[in-house]
Image (spheres, rainbow, N blue to C red):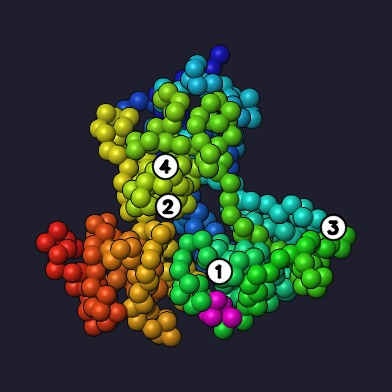
Amino acid sequence: MSQRYDVVVVGAGHGGAQACIALRAAGFEGSILLIGKEPDLPYERPPLSKDYLAGKRPFERMLIRPEKFWTDQKIETCLSQAVQSVDAERQLLTTDGGLSIAYGHLIWSTGADPRRLTCSGHDLAGVHTVRHRQDADRLTGELDSIQRVVVIGGGYIGLEAAAVMRKLGKQVTLLEAADRVLARVAGREISEFYQHVHRQEGVDVRLGAAMSCIRGDNGQVAAVELSDGSLLECQCVIVGIGVTPSVAPLIEAGAAGENGVRVDSSCKTSLPKVFAIGDCAEHQNYFADDAWLRLESVQNATDMAATVAAAIVGQDRPYRSVPRFWSDQYDLKLQTIGLSIGHDHAVLRGSPETKSFTVAYLKSGRLIALDCVNNPKDFAQGRALVTQASEMDIAALEDTTYPLKECVTEASKPSIAV
């Protein structure tokens, strides 16, 4: 005999936690169960590759809400359980711990799993990903025996991990297969800036670098072999080569999806009474000309959670939030608003040499995204401008004596409210 809940939330990350919080805030009084495959209550994930890995932030300060909150809000938690199957017709799911749970509505918020290396030596001790608390704990537990680190992948996770390892005094080599770091998420100006900063900080950044395998000694990482046969001696390999959406049970249940689970503007999947949010939800994004994509950000998970909560309580609130991202490396905070996909012009505001500047991305003269490095003022003013795809005066945009909000053409100014 199975237990039944009015709402079952699968995935105890940002999206899952915020879905529960948003439901109660919207006045939902039904029963709620939050299922998580980790043993911990919901916690913030971004610090894992930053302050937590560096030992600057204790885990208790990463909890999204204290344990008492979940009890007070009558939100049951079921931890250390992974959902294995979903029966959409019977509205029933089963876990790897043998639980059978029926639901009125199901919210799928399982995020994504890190891509693993498949080369020889990928399973040696000392090869790490940084996605969960246990990942970071395993890595920090080995730090005393580590002198040399090889980071594979020049995205946010790889660069953040490289920065932390350098701060801890480790010798770091970063391998990126593309011709620049952050190639998938930022323009060339930002890539070149971060490459320069990391090299200044002592990271050996190698672009267009292809690895062949990982060599070991008695089951432990000893070196990374590159495609040209050269060896990089190391005691640790950190892998940051992207993620794969964790959606197999829903796809097997019949949900539509190619790159994750496809959802509509209310985050509903093709399965009845089933929603999907966060990293695993493939949606048509208004700020990418309605292209189907996934967004891997806390903001996206939080905003989608609010959309689902509104739909369940009968207050339709279609998802249409301008994307936002951030990354902390050394003394730099990169804040991004919008999506630079398809831009035809990039304008540099300020000088990268000052470590405080902005890159504005335009499409047909209209602002579609901003990358702001240590420039919170541009980031704050840019939200409304990007949301409305404001037409920009290029000459004013290049002149930092003009506040960003004053770089709008006369034709666009009447509709702007910053």
**Tag 2: amino acid:** Val
Can you identify the residue that label 2 sits on? 298
- Please tell me how many numbered marks the rendered image carries: 4
219 is within the stretch colored magenta = no
Q: Residue at x 33, y 78 (%)?
A: 349
Percent of width and height locating residue 244: 58, 46
Can you identify the residue that label 1 sits on? 181
Marks 2 and 4, the one that precedes in the sequence? 4
Residue 216: name its quadrant: bottom right
Helix, strand or loop for disc 4: strand
- CA–CA distance in space, label 2 to label 1: 22 Å
Residue 76: name its quadrant: top left
Residue 352: name its quadrant: bottom left
Numbered tag placed on residue 219 in the rendering: 3
Q: Relative to residue 216, is residue 407 depicted above or below? A: below
**Tag 4: amino acid:** His
**Tag 1: amino acid:** Val
Percent of width and height locating residue 362: 33, 66
Please rate how many residues cluster around mark 3, counting C-alpha atoms within 10 Å: few if below 14, some from 14 to 19, many from 20: few
Image quadrant in which the N terminus is located: top right
Q: CB of mark 2 within 8 Å of CB of mark 1?
A: no
What residue span does the magenta drawing correspond to?
195-199
Marks 2 and 1, the one that precedes in the sequence? 1
Q: Which numbered mark, 2 or 4, is in the foreground of this view?
A: 4
- CA–CA distance in space, label 4 to label 3: 42 Å
Can you identify the residue that label 4 sits on? 283
